[in-house]
């Protein structure tokens, strides 16, 4: 029941700028989500359908937003980052797509 990842251009651009250790940590969390896409917390309102997984790296909290498509077995990866300004950035991205 594994899903296939589809990353947004914003996700890929942001990931490319990160340190290799953080990139590996992010990849590990994506792999976990591919096996169990219901791990993240579901959002409401404008972000309905989007889920957010929280994880810590170097004692700092990071959020990873994604949307599972159960029909096609696809996991859309939107963005990730620290909590500050995360939801505003995510809402702008969702509204623009």
Image (cartoon, grey):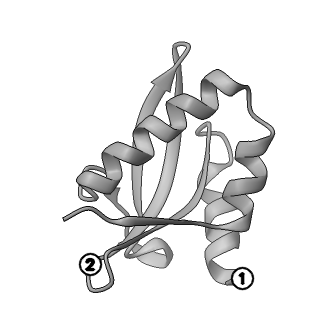
Q: Which residue is mark 1?
A: 96
Which residue is at a point 43% across and 47% down the rendered structure image?
30
Q: Element under label 2?
A: loop
Q: Which residue is mark 2?
A: 70
Give the left or right position of residue 67, taking residue 96 as reference: left
Crowd tier of the residue under label 2, counting other residues whose Cα lies within 10 Å: few below 14, some 14–19, many 20 or above: few
Residue 80 in the image: state x and y as whole percent: 60, 47
Residue 35 in the image: state x and y as whole percent: 25, 53
Give the left or right position of residue 91, taking residue 68 as reference: right
Q: Nearer the viewer, residue 52 or 36?
A: 36
Q: Nearer the viewer, mark 2 or mark 1?
A: 2
Report the quarter where the C terminus lies. Answer: bottom right
Question: Vertical placement of 22 versus 16: above or below?
Answer: above
Question: Vertical placement of 70 versus 81: above or below?
Answer: below
Distance from Cα at disc 2 to Cα at disc 1: 23 Å
Image quarter of residue 28: top left
Which residue is at a point 68% across and 48% down the rendered structure image?
85
Image quarter of residue 8: bottom right
- Asked whether the residues under the numbered discs 2 and 1 touch, taking CB atoms below 8 Å apart as contact, a structural biologist would say no
Which residue is at a point 31% across and 75% down the rendered structure image?
73
Image quarter of residue 17: top right
Question: Vertical placement of 25 versus 83: above or below?
Answer: above
Q: Element under label 1?
A: helix
Crowd tier of the residue under label 1, counting other residues whose Cα lies within 10 Å: few below 14, some 14–19, many 20 or above: few
For the image, the number of numbered tags is 2
Residue 14 numbered mark, or none: none
Residue 29 in the image: state x and y as whole percent: 41, 39
């Amino acid at each position: 029941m594994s899903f296939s990842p589809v990353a947004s251009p914003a996700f890929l651009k942001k990931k490319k700028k990160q340190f290799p250790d953080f990139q590996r940590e992010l990849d590990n969390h994506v792999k976990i989500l591919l096996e169990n896409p219901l791990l993240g917390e579901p959002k409401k309102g404008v972000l309905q359908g989007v889920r957010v997984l929280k994880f810590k790296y170097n004692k700092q909290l990071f959020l990873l937003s994604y949307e599972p498509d159960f029909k096609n077995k696809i996991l859309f990866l939107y963005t990730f980052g620290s909590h500050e300004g995360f939801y505003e950035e995510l809402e702008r991205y969702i509204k623009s797509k």
